[in-house]
């Protein structure tokens, strides 16, 4: 008989937490307020991670989340990964409603893995933005 260990699910979930910034399930304790704060913090971390990566490899080397090409195949418009994450972060801190599906959170996790670096970078933007995020008044629906 092929039995899985009793703690199989728990170990599997712990491994996923270590590799992914965003989990699909969000705790329902003060659900709306905590969810908005938690997603905002994670988006700020992701945005800073992209900034750190681009400070090493160059802004021109980041991937584009979306782009438009003309008939000759030249890129005439693009939206970089940083702009995509920054726009999503703006939705959170401005109190707009958001109904992102699991595909959006998967995209965030892909970006988290894509922009991983092995060195520590001093990012002067992170601390100020983190402090501002912590001081925000999070109200229901905000």
Image (tube, rainbow, N blue to C red):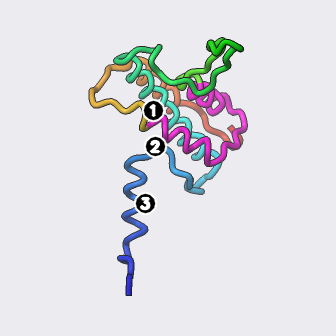
Looking at the image, residue 42 lies above or below residue 69? below
The one nearer the camera, 63 or 50, is 63
Q: Which residue is drawn at 57% across and 31% down?
A: 136
Is the Cβ of the residue at disc 1 closer than 8 Å to that at disc 3?
Answer: no
Residue receiving disc 3 = 13
Q: Distance between the residues labelled 1 and 3?
A: 21 Å
Quadrant (top left/top right/bottom left/bottom right) for the C terminus: top right
Q: Which residue is drawn at 37% across and 56% down?
A: 15
Foreground mark, 1 or 3? 3
Q: Is residue 14 left or right of residue 36?
A: left
Q: In which quarter of the image is residue 105?
A: top right
Vertically, is 36 above or below 84?
below
Q: What stretch is highlighted in magenta?
A: 84-112
Task: Please name the residue shown 55% across and 44% down the image.
Answer: 106
Q: Is residue 9 above or below residue 46?
A: below
Left or right: 50 in relation to 120: right
Q: Is residue 2 part of the magenta span, yes or no? A: no
Q: Mark 1 points at which residue?
A: 45
Earlier along the polypeptide chain: callout 2 or callout 1? 2
Indicate the secondary structure of the residue bearing disc 2: loop
């Amino acid at each position: 008989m092929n039995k899985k260990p009793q703690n199989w699910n728990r170990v599997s979930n712990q491994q996923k937490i270590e590799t992914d910034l965003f989990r699909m399930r969000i705790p329902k304790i003060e659900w709306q307020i905590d969810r908005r704060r938690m997603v905002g913090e994670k988006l700020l971390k992701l945005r800073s991670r992209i900034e750190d990566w681009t400070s090493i490899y160059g802004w021109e080397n980041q991937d584009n989340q979306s782009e438009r090409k003309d008939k000759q195949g030249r890129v005439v418009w693009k939206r970089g990964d940083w702009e995509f994450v920054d726009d999503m972060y703006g939705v959170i801190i401005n109190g707009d409603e958001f109904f992102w599906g699991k595909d959006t959170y998967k995209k965030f996790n892909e970006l988290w893995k894509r922009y991983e670096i092995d060195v520590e970078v001093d990012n002067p933007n992170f601390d100020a933005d983190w402090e501002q995020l912590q001081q925000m008044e999070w109200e229901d629906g905000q």
